[in-house]
Amino acid sequence: MSVDDTILDADVGIVGAGPGGMAAANVLAQAGLSVVVLDEGMRAGGQIYRQLPEGLVNHGKIAEPPSHDGGHALLERFAAAKVTLVSHATVWDAAPGKLWFEHGERSRLLRCRHIVLAPGGYDRCVPFPGWTLPGVVTAGALQVMVRGFGVVPGRRALVAGSGPLLLPTVTALLGAGVEVVAALEASSRWRALRAAPAVLGNALKRREAMWYARQLWKAGVKLRWGWTVFACEGDGRVQRAIIGKVDADGRPRRGTELKLDVDVVGAGFGLVPSVELALRLGCTSRFDAARGGHCVVVDEQQRTSVPGVFAAGEICGIGGAEVAAAEGQLVAEAVIALAKGSTVSAEAQRRAQKERKAADTMLRAFAPLPGLAELARPDTIVCRCEDVTRLGAQQAAQLHGDSLRAIKVGCRAGMGPCQARICGPSLQAMATGDGRRAMDLPVVQVPVKPVRTETMLDAPT
Amino acid sequence: MSGRIAGLDDATRGPRELIEFTFAGEKVTAWAGDSIAMALWAGGTTAVRSSSKNGSPRGVLCNMGICYECLVVVDGRTVRSCTTPVRAGMVVEPGGRP
Ligand SMILES: Cc1cc2nc3c(=O)[nH]c(=O)nc-3n(C[C@H](O)[C@H](O)[C@H](O)COP(=O)(O)OP(=O)(O)OC[C@H]3O[C@@H](n4cnc5c(N)ncnc54)[C@H](O)[C@@H]3O)c2cc1C
Ligand code: FES
């Protein structure tokens, strides 16, 4: 819905209408608390249960995996719940009890006693020659095109990267009638086997894996393990991709290259948690490479280090939709406990812990490979906002030091509007040549997402 | 070739509303509910601006509002084309520096 009021009041303000935010909102509303959910997207669903625009229906054209049944149920309950959802609402700053957002070209404020952060995450990019060519996008971008807009991304696609999200990207493309020329997983088959306990020990994940295997088999797409995209080429847009083998650390094995004709490339090397708002609020975070980078630290009731601020889903570490929904349920019970003096159910805690543990096992098998930093050549652009090359970043690191801040000062990398969301996860690794180098905590600037200057000047207090 | 997935129309509502806008002076046909970036992409336009530093063409990277590679100018204002819905008669120009 859209709202007219400049200032909104609620018991609970939730950022994000993905599985985490929706699950929390459903439970909170049932307990009689007033809930406002703010989401930048056009409709509820978040990344995984992204809906087509009003007036379009899937009709089973774009095949959905078994786990999406749970998503449809969640969406239905959310639509029926007594919750105010404000779509097209970009939250650009936060303080305890306050969320500032832009909606309908106006500056607005949500005052709420409790804040639940469920902003999800975004694709991890690894720079390679030609990745700035139009037509080369993230794996997630292709899913959004197909499942969020009903758009056919191209005729011949390459999907490359690492982690479980490559599979839904391939099936989305197949649903759109795109020929998937190659699907490349950088991890070796042996490394990926470490994920087996998480899949075999969970009935839904077993069914899910079988479903994806069948979809790929039916379409004749073979997932190549230990391969990735080395470079993209083209005149004004992508026309060819150079692919090749990588070693166990992800380092490119030069001499194994193959050339493919493609008109669209989706590259995704896992996900990164969206922690900007939490950092603005002063929440404690912790670096966990397998969980995608800097994650917000929460206790056994999803409480952050800041009183009145809770977090659920990918923001606490990448984990997938089942983790997000389980943590959403738990976070709601924790807020209700605080508001009404009730207690959190052991069942909700047990479920969230179980899902999180399975996800951690899975993700350790696909933790970022350090050698992938070697895909970038000296003249490859690493920071796309400021057009800084890898060589430029290396020189800055030598001259000024290898902290994120020193590199920024030295060459402007990470100073653009994306606030290092794109280059940050691999910038220090590429500047130092040490792929195991963890990324420093980024300095968050306000607005955390660019909004109109008037929005900041007119911000209600 | 990019385009639209056929057969997604909601039979109870009839065909979707078509909208026209211009990009770099050329007429573009879109569907209500499209973002600017997706209307352009479906019509085969993947580059929406060129880098002000090295002039190279740029387009959608994340398609979810976090990278700022897809900037365009609408009525004098710089916006992300992937998160901005199309409106009839909108005048869209390629964006410059992010
Ligand atoms: C493009 C993409 C596709 C994915 N597809 C799959 C898939 O097919 N299968 C799978 O298992 N997992 C998928 N994932 C992983 C997915 O993130 C999780 O499974 C699940 O969606 C996480 O739920 P969440 O509630 O934590 O966050 P999300 O579902 O990511 O929801 C977060 C919401 O918060 C909103 N938001 C964030 N910041 C702000 C802000 N500042 N202001 C306002 N709103 C904000 C976003 O618009 C978004 O709707 C995908 C991830 C991405 C990025
Ligand atoms: S494509 Fe990344 S912000 Fe639009």
Image: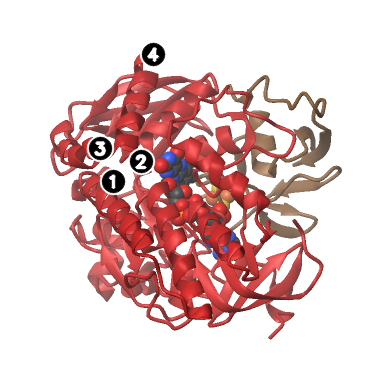
Dot 4 falls on a residue whose secondary structure is helix
> Which residue is identified by label 1?
A377
Q: Tell if the residue under mark 1 belongs to the same chain as the one under mark 4.
A: yes
Residue A295 drawn at (x, y percent)? 34, 65
Q: Tell if the residue under mark 4 belongs to the same chain as the one under mark 2.
A: yes
Q: Split into 4 quadrants, where in the image is the N terminus of chain A?
A: bottom right
Residue A248 drawn at (x, y percent)? 13, 39
Could you say which chain is coloured red in the image?
A: A
Residue A196 drawn at (x, y percent)? 19, 37
For residue A385, above or below residue B37: below
Indicate the amino acid at tag 3.
Val
Tell me, for residue A218, which label it has, or none. Answer: 4
**Gap in angstroms between the C-alphas marked 3 and 2:** 35 Å
Q: Are marks 1 and 2 in contact (CB under 8 Å)?
A: yes
> Which residue is identified by label 2?
A129
Q: Earlier in the sequence, mark 4 or mark 2?
A: 2
Dot 1 falls on a residue whose secondary structure is loop
Q: Is residue A113 left or right of residue A55?
A: left
Foreground: A219 or B39?
A219
